[in-house]
Image: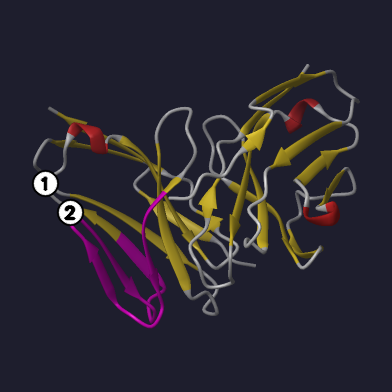
Amino acid sequence: GENVEQHPSTLSVQEGDSAVIKCTYSDSASNYFPWYKQELGKRPQLIIDIRSNVGEKKDQRIAVTLNKTAKHFSLHITETQPEDSAVYFCAASEKLVFGKGTKLTVNP
Amino acid sequence: EPEVTQTPSHQVTQMGQEVILRCVPISNHLYFYWYRQILGQKVEFLVSFYNNEISEKSEIFDDQFSVERPDGSNFTLKIRSTKLEDSAMYFCARKRQANEKLFFGSGTQLSVL
């Protein structure tokens, strides 16, 4: 079955800096890669997703890149703000196999 | 983002008891999923449900678990005889069609004592 690895487990940046979170997956048949943001005690919220027919997708300060050959995908957040602080999860496949999460802290 | 309602929001039960968690349906949503998240850990896939039957399940989803959606009503997850390690947040998720985005419900915090 699918296995997703996510790095780093924690990430601390200064407000205004960029943050990058990386994930790798094992199943070459997976073709859907969403990213979820989870604030403490709340549900995961979809922030961006990408399908395997494109290599990059951008939505304002958030972008995702996908390298199907290497089986890895990344989340890029630019101009980080304190409200970006949360745990971010990557996932692969339609049924969503999640990575272990990255706790992002944006320091004002 | 569509509202996905789950009931109850919190459930406390004794070990060995049965619990039923509910996800309120939207009529045009055909694909349903249950996930669980143990405190401080990742979200784990339990089961997917389409056309009134299970389409896929994980190793976690053993004989103690069952799902059903009788007559288009609530989509439910039943745990027959709860164990301490079943304590977790359980999320329902659903979508209208196969290649659509998946949105999570507000979750049910299950505590097994």
Picture disc at residue A61: 2
Magenta segment: does it hold A62?
yes
Left or right side of B24 for A93:
left
Q: Earlier in the sequence, mark 2 or mark 1?
A: 2
Picture disc at residue B47: none
How far, Cα to Cα, is label 2 from label 1?
7 Å
Which residue is the extreme one toward the left? A16
Element on which disc 1 rests? loop
Quadrant position of the C terminus of chain B in the picture: top right
Q: Are marks 2 and 1 on the same chain?
A: yes
Can you identify the residue that label 1 sits on? Answer: A79
Mark 2 falls within which chain? A
Element on which disc 2 rests? loop
Going by the numbered disc 1, the residue's amino acid type is: Glu
Left or right side of A78 for A101:
right
**CB under 8 Å between discs 2 and 1:** yes
Residue at 86% of width from left, 22% of height from top? B15
Q: Position of residue A93 (x, y in %)?
A: 54, 68
What's the magenta bit mostly, secondary-structure-wise? strand
Q: Position of residue B86 (x, y in %)?
A: 75, 32
Q: Position of residue A3 (x, y in %)?
A: 56, 62
| Chain part drawn in magenta | A46-74
Position of residue A74 relative to residue B41, above or below, is below
Q: Position of residue A48 (x, y in %)?
A: 34, 59
Residue at 48% of width from left, 52% of height from top? A99
Position of residue B40 relative to residue A69, above or below, is above
Task: Say which quarter of the image contains residue A59.
Answer: bottom left
Residue at 10% of width from left, 44% of height from top? A17
Q: Nearer the viewer, residue B33 or A63?
A: B33
Q: Nearer the viewer, residue B101 or A19?
A: B101
Task: Say which quarter of the image contains residue A96.
Answer: bottom right
Task: Say which quarter of the image contains residue B48.
Answer: bottom right
